[in-house]
Image (tube, rainbow, N blue to C red):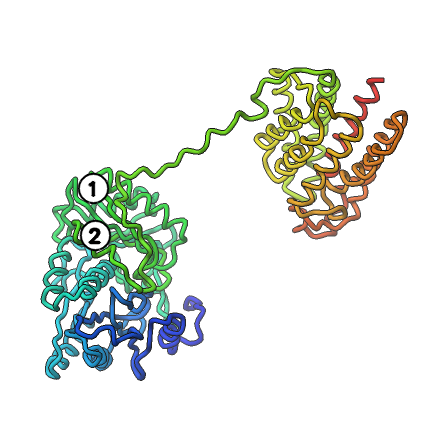
Amino acid sequence: MEPQKKLINAAESCVDEALLGLVRASGGLSLLRGHRVVLRSDLENLKGKVALLSGGGSGHEPSHAGYIGAGMLSAAVAGGVFASPPPGSILAAILSLHNAGASGVLLIVKNYTGDRLNFGLAAEQARNQGVAVDMVIVAEDCAFDQPSKAGRRGLCGTVFIHKLAGALAEEGCSLAQIVSKVTEILKGIGTLGVSLSPCSVPGCLPSFDLPPGDMELGLGIHGEPGIKRSKVASADEVVKTMIDHMTNPSSQSHLPLKSGDSVVVCVNNLGALSCLEMAVVTRSAILCLESLGVVVARVMSGLFMTSLEMAGVSLTLMRADKETLRLIDAKTTAPAWPNLSSVCLSGRSYITEPLTTSKRPQDEKHSEGPLSPVMHKALEKICSTLLEKQEELNSLDRASGDGDCGNTHAQAAKAIQEWLHGHVVPGCPGQLLLVLAGLVQEKMGGSSGALYSLFLTAAAGHVTEGRSDAVAWANAMNAGTEAMKKYGGAAPGDRTMLDALCPAVDELIKLTTAPSGGHMAVLQSAVKKAASGAEATRDLKARAGRASYISPNLLSLPDPGAVAVATILKAILEVLEGQK
């Protein structure tokens, strides 16, 4: 099996190039020459304050260098992908911060043996050089009921510690005060991960094998296996399983959580979930916690501590009192910290009522007029003709589209027939056109529904009870067609319904100058033009609509949309001819 492809230049240079990409893209960051150490570019602002240094293996981006900024980390040191950083670089970072005038340096370390050893060694060496250094170890993983001697792993809860310690340092707290406060808060933090896929280190095979349709609960951020494999369930079920496990008192690594507790929630994308899935999981987490009586005070959802391209999510819960929330809400310039709202999320009203819209045109009471009978007849004829042509239009559409053109027109026809049974046809043609626009928009669906609805809505304003002569109708048809062109993006010659409609409308414009005796001849000519326009679409290349994706040599039949328009116009003409 070939290693998973990645968009990099080379496996051996990807870490350094990624660090350079991060630093070049942010004016607040700087790179320490000769080391994989990213620093604040304004180190002079650390004078007299405690500096914060974190770090670990690469592959967890934006951790840790994305959290560098005023109010968070002062520097971060990176190892290779999933590899602990060397003590020499950690020491170089500590000395840079000390040299900038920091009153002390706090190391924030995830609980992995390599990290503890390397950060610990650098801390001892720095102390020998007279630097005030202390270390906080984050071990908030809730996966194992009985953790081994190595203890619980450090996961995404580390990001909360960056934020809380950073806010305290910014306020001028001493090293001892910060250590004591975050150590206390750490007791109320728990994290659990679940994944639907493994990840692969650049140049290597995937870290473990996870068959499609399976998920792994409680895995680490380096692809270490978890505690339980099962079939992928729904988001709600997965989140409930996670929260139940995290808060289960029979587990030694559980997070004690009771009804009435306030929490900050971090829904962390392990790398490859879509934003859509993340939002679904976030909803599940909020609802699940609220069902336990827990108050959800803040939520952050996104990429905070990843595991390369692992398709999974981790949930971090932190019990939070007012003071903790104040520190979470404190401003920071760190690019990867989200722009959170400082409002308690549980209990707030989050639905806005829409304006009560006026009644739909098709529901309003209309009064009949002299034109009602003929318009009623024309509609009946159009509907029955479209229903007769349903299969013909479908088969034309099968050649160029999804084969449902007849069905969509039939749906519209049935909706109009149903409406005619229960309503009178308004005497005002414009009102009728708006009724039809409403019916078509609701019942026809698809882009043809939108196009007909646009046509009818744009045409409606041009014909009223007092203004319904031939000129008004010609102007209405023209306005409707122009709206179709404007929003649909097609023009005559693109093999669409416009190829039947436009020639007919061009002909109908002659009504504006024709003597009243010549009106019927213009109508007859317009219907002929529509029919020949539809027929001519056999030889046109589709440039708009779904048919434009089909190979041109498959399109030897006329366009179904154009045929439908020609059919409708012919039906209207037949009714008008019968009126004489």
Compared with residue 388, is residue 295 higher up or lower down, i.e. above or below? Answer: below
Which residue appears at 23% of the width and 56% of the height? 328
Looking at the image, which residue is at 38% across and 58% down? 272
Give residue 371's quadrant in the image. top right
Asked if residue 424 is positioned above or below residue 168 in the image, the reply reads above
Q: Which mark is residue 325?
A: 2
At label 1, the amino acid type is: Val
For mark 1, give the secondary structure: loop
Closer to the eye: label 2 or 1: 2
Is residue 99 shown left or right of residue 9? left
Q: Which residue is mark 1?
A: 294
- Comes first in the chain, label 2 or label 1: 1
Residue occupying the point 28% across, 54% down:
314
Identity, as a three-letter code, of the amino acid under mark 2: Leu
Mark linked to residue 103: none
Label 2: state its secondary structure: helix
Q: What crowding class fits label 2: few (fewer than 14 Cα within 10 Å), some (14-19), or many (20 or more)? A: many
Q: Position of residue 297 (x, y in %)?
A: 24, 46
Q: Residue at x 33, y 65 (%)?
A: 61
Q: Is residue 438 left or right of residue 122?
A: right
Let me know if residue 541 appears in the view: yes
